[in-house]
Amino acid sequence: MKILVVGGGGREHAIIKKIKENEKVTKIYALPGNGGIAADAECVDIGAKDIDKIVEFSKEKEIDYAIVAPDDPLVLGCVDKLEEAGIPCFGPRANAAIIEGSKVFSKELMKKYNIPTAAYEVFDDINEAVKYVDKAKLPLVVKADGLALGKGVVIATSRGDALTAIVNCMQNKVFGESGTHVVIEEFMEGPEVSVLAFTDGKTVVPMVSSMDHKRALEGGTGPNTGGMGTIAPNPHYTDEIAKECMEKIFIPTINAMNKEGRTFKGCLYFGLMLTKDGPKVIEYNCRFGDPETQVVLPLLESDLLDIMMAVTEERLSEVEVKFSDKSACCVIAASEGYPVKYDKGFEIKISKKVIDHVYVAGAAKADGKLVTNGGRVLGCTAVADTLEEAIADAYKLMEGVSFENIYYRHDIGYKAVNVKKA
C-alpha cells in the first residue's frame, strides 16, 4: 500500500513510525514532512494547506490511503477533496472538523446537547465584549473563535489582561479572521486531562489518557507553548471518571454531531477539566494532539493502520484496539527562547542508540545535515513499566541529543508522580 501523510511535525513522525509497522505498507509520502521524518518517509515539498496540489500528487502517485493529521487542512476540507478524487482518508470532513475550527460552534453544540462545559458568552462587537468584562467575575478565559496555532486562548487574571486579549483579537487582528468573534468563558479549576478517541461516527474508542505540560519554563511557569512534554496515562483519570466521561461527554458528542448532520470520523481530541462538579470539556480538537500522540501511540499494541481503515469504513466495532498497561513520557527539546524568539539553523546530533525513540518536529536538511528549523525541535519518548522509570528513561534518551541552543524542561511528569504517591 502507498500511504500519504499530510503534515510535518512530531505528531506526524509518530504516526508514520507506527504506520511503518504494518507489513502491507510499501511506501509512505509525507507532505511536507521535515528533515527528521525524511528518515522514515519520502518528504515532498507541498504545504499541508495546499489542498489542490495534495490531491493532484495523490492521484499522480495512485495513493491507496491518506492520513490528514493537522487542523488547518482538515478545516479547509482536505479530506473532502481527497475522497472526491477517490482516495480513502483518515480524518473528518470539513463540516465535522468545524468542532475545532470554530469555538463558537463547539460551545453552542455543547449548550444545545447538555454536554458539560464552562459557562460562556459569545461576542462579535468589541464594545459589548468590553462591557461584559467590566462586570464579569475574574479570572476569565478569552478565546479567539477560529484556529490560532494554539495561541488564541488567554487566561486573564485581571480586567486589563482580558481587555488586552479582546483588543488583540478583535481590533488588532493578531489572529486574523480567527479573532472576529470571541468566546469569553468562566475560569474552571481542576486537573486537566487529554483523551484522544478513535470514532467512525457510530463507535467511540478512547485511547490512553495523557497529561500535557504547556508552559515553557520549569514548574509550569512562563508563556504557553504547543507543549513541552507529556506523560501517559494521566493518574487523575480513574476508571470511574473514564466511565462518566464516556456517558456524559464522549458518546453525547458523537450523537450530537450526527444529529447536526456532521458525522465525525477520525480522531476526536477531548481536552477535559476535572472540576469539583465533575468532568467538563475545555475544548475539542479534530485530530491527534501534539505532543500527546508521541506518548499515546507508543503504547498502542494493535495495528494503527488497520484501526484507521476501520474508522474510514465505519467498522471500528469489529477491530481490536488494545493499549499496553505501561507508562510513557515524552520530553520536548526546543530552541532556547521558544515560543517568543529563537534562532534556527543549528546542527542536530542524535546518537544511533536513541534515534528509534525520537520524533522530529522543527528540523530541516541543509548540506546533508539535520538542522533546527522551529521552536519545538524534537521529542524523546520512553516507555517503561512505571511512570517513574519512563520519566527517568526519557531524560536519559535526551542525553543522546544535542544542538547549540537546546532547551528542555527538567520536570516533565513530576506532578503526575506526586499524584500517584498521594
Image: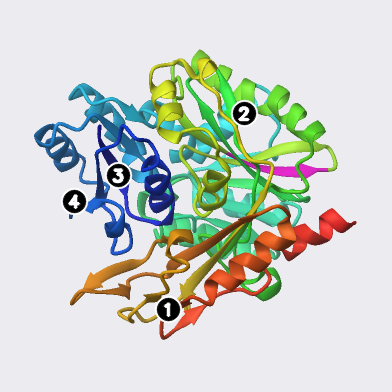
> What is the magenta range?
270-275
Which picture quadrant has residue 300? top right
Q: Is residue 380 placed above or below 298 in the rendered structure?
A: below
For the residue pair 376 and 417, the one nearer the viewer reads as 417
According to the image, label 3 marks what residue? Answer: 6
For the residue pair 364 and 27, the one nearer the viewer reads as 27
Please say which color scheme the image uses.
rainbow
Give coordinates of residue 112: x percent, y percent: 62, 22
Q: Local crowd at mark 2 within 10 Å, few (<14), some, or many (≥20)?
A: some
Which of the labelled discs sits on residue 115, or is there none? Answer: none
Residue 272 painted magenta = yes
Specify the amino acid type for callout 2.
Answer: Met
Decide which of tag 3 and tag 1 comes sooner along the chain: 3
Is there CB contact under 8 Å for labels 3 and 2?
no
According to the image, label 1 marks what residue? Answer: 341
For the residue pair 395 and 281, the one nearer the viewer reads as 395
For the residue pair 62 and 101, the one nearer the viewer reads as 62
Q: CA distance from mark 1 to mark 2?
A: 37 Å
According to the image, label 4 marks what residue? Answer: 46
Q: Local crowd at mark 4 within 10 Å, few (<14), some, or many (≥20)?
A: some
Q: CA distance from mark 4 to mark 2?
A: 36 Å
If the image is split into quadrants, where does the C terminus sit? bottom right
Decide which of tag 4 and tag 3 comes sooner along the chain: 3
